[in-house]
Image (cartoon, helix red, strand yellow):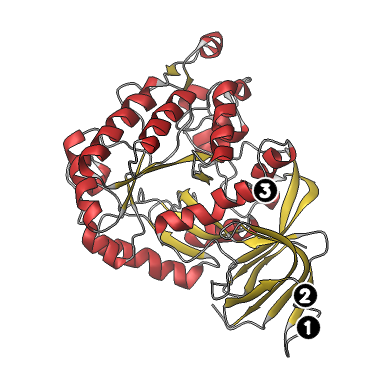
Amino acid sequence: MRNPRPLLLTNARVIDPARGSDFHGDVFLAEGVVKDAATGLAAAGIPEGAEVIDCRGCIVAPGLVDMRAFVGEPGFEHLETLASASHAAAAGGVTTLVCQPDTAPVVDEPAMVDFIMRRARDTAVVRIHPMASITKGLKGEEMTEMGLLKAAGAVAFTDAHRSVMNARVLRRALAYARDFDALIVHHTEDVTLSGGDMNQGEFASRLGLSGVPKSAETIILERDVRLVGDARGRYHAAALTCAESLEVLQRAKEAGLPITASATINHLSFNELDIAGYRSYFKVRPPLRADADRQALIQAVASGLIDVVVSDHTPQDVEGKRLPFSEAEHGAIGIETLLSAGLRLVHAGALDLITLLRALSTRPAELLGLDAGSLRPGAPADVIIFDPDLPYVLDLTTLKSRSRNTPFDDARMTGRVLRTIVAGDVVYHYA
């Protein structure tokens, strides 16, 4: 990052979910950190050499921390690179991007963690942190050297969209991670039940598509809760999708277990009915569920039961998506639309803004031990300026990602990022 001019963001609605604050005031950024965020900074005088940005009608908040994104590099650069993902992140207000280990080769050795961090420093415009795999080669058989991987810079451990089906291996991983205060992020889906195309039920039958039952998720989550009870390692459910899983999560939290969970922006925004017409951009893993499940997820975010909202950014090329639904690849991109899609829920009255921003920034930073998600003095100057009421229609041709598989194609959105600032440097400016 270069050494930018000091920035004084004036006349803004300032929201800092880390401190529960929401006020009209100013934010001063200098030397790569937040110097102050308070009412009346501009009235006290403009610091020498500072650039003043009038944020009238806009919100200043901590940059988003996206805790679950696939970045193709290395091995799948035709889908996404660290550079292209970082530009998409900046356009979406994401200042910290956490990438998954399912690359080629897999991120299961310290050298791979080091490669991604060095490559990100050279090519990315936002902060990028890698997760390493729980098991070698993502095979679910042999645990990785978590201590060495964490020392190299891995912020958490996950087998990406694969569940560790061997309970003994996962239990050992949880116990080992506990000694390093490491976070296990686990995909809860029983592979013996999850071979279908969409949510199991009447609608799948009407479409003639094979279904994935909710039990594929709840069976693994129930098992994992018991393993956490034994090992007491920190555990995070990567992407819960149904009301039954929320009941399991609620019981686990009430029992005092160190368990947290995410929901994806796709599962908060869409339901199984959106697949009508066999639209493959809505084919994701886990599958979209019934609208009652979507509403339960939204309520869980509102109450704090669900800790984090993620993009689950999974780029796929045209060859992988422009196929009959049952043959199409799973996944949708989502970094660039993460905030705008979340604001839909705010405008609908389903979430309040500070709760959404907490789930998108402060809470993931806390779980991963990152210095992010806050506007406190001394925090990194990773800040976004967004207009919550600016309408636009999503145009695929303007996306920064290398892939175009978004379920929000031609969607009418309200609210977008105007500037993204990383370490005090403006890395995205909406023209």
Residue 385 spot, x, y in % from top left: 70, 62
Q: Which residue is mark 2?
A: 40
CB within 8 Å, label 1 to label 2: yes
Is residue 336 visible in the rendered image? The answer is no
Task: Nearest to the eye among marks 1 and 3: give it.
Answer: 1
Q: Position of residue 127 (x, y in %)?
A: 50, 65
- Are there few (<14), some (14-19), or many (20+) residues within 10 Å of tag 1? few
Numbered disc 3: secondary structure: helix
- Please tell me whether residue 223 is drawn above or below residue 202 in the rendered image: below
Quarter of the figure that contains the N terminus: bottom right
Element at badge 1? loop
Q: Residue at left 34%, top 41%?
A: 256
Q: Amino acid at mark 1?
A: Ala
Query: How many circles with numbers are drawn on the protein?
Result: 3
* Residue type highlighted by circle 2: Gly
- Which comes before the other along the chain, label 3 or label 2? 2
Under mark 3, the amino acid is: Leu
Instruction: Please give the name of the residue rendered at 59% of the width and 34% of the height, measured from the top-left corner.
Output: 298
Question: Circle 3: is it few (<14), some (14-19), or many (20+) Cα within 10 Å?
Answer: some
Identify the residue at image location x=24%, y=52%: 178
Which residue was labeled with disc 3? 353
**In this figure, which residue is indicated by the disc labeled 1?**
44
How far from the left and from the top, in percent, is residue 63?
59, 61
| Pointer 1 or 3: first along the chain | 1
How far apart, in angstroms, are the residues tagged by discs 1 and 3? 29 Å
Examine the rendered structure and indicate whether residue 240 appears above or below residue 126: above
Element carrying mark 2: loop
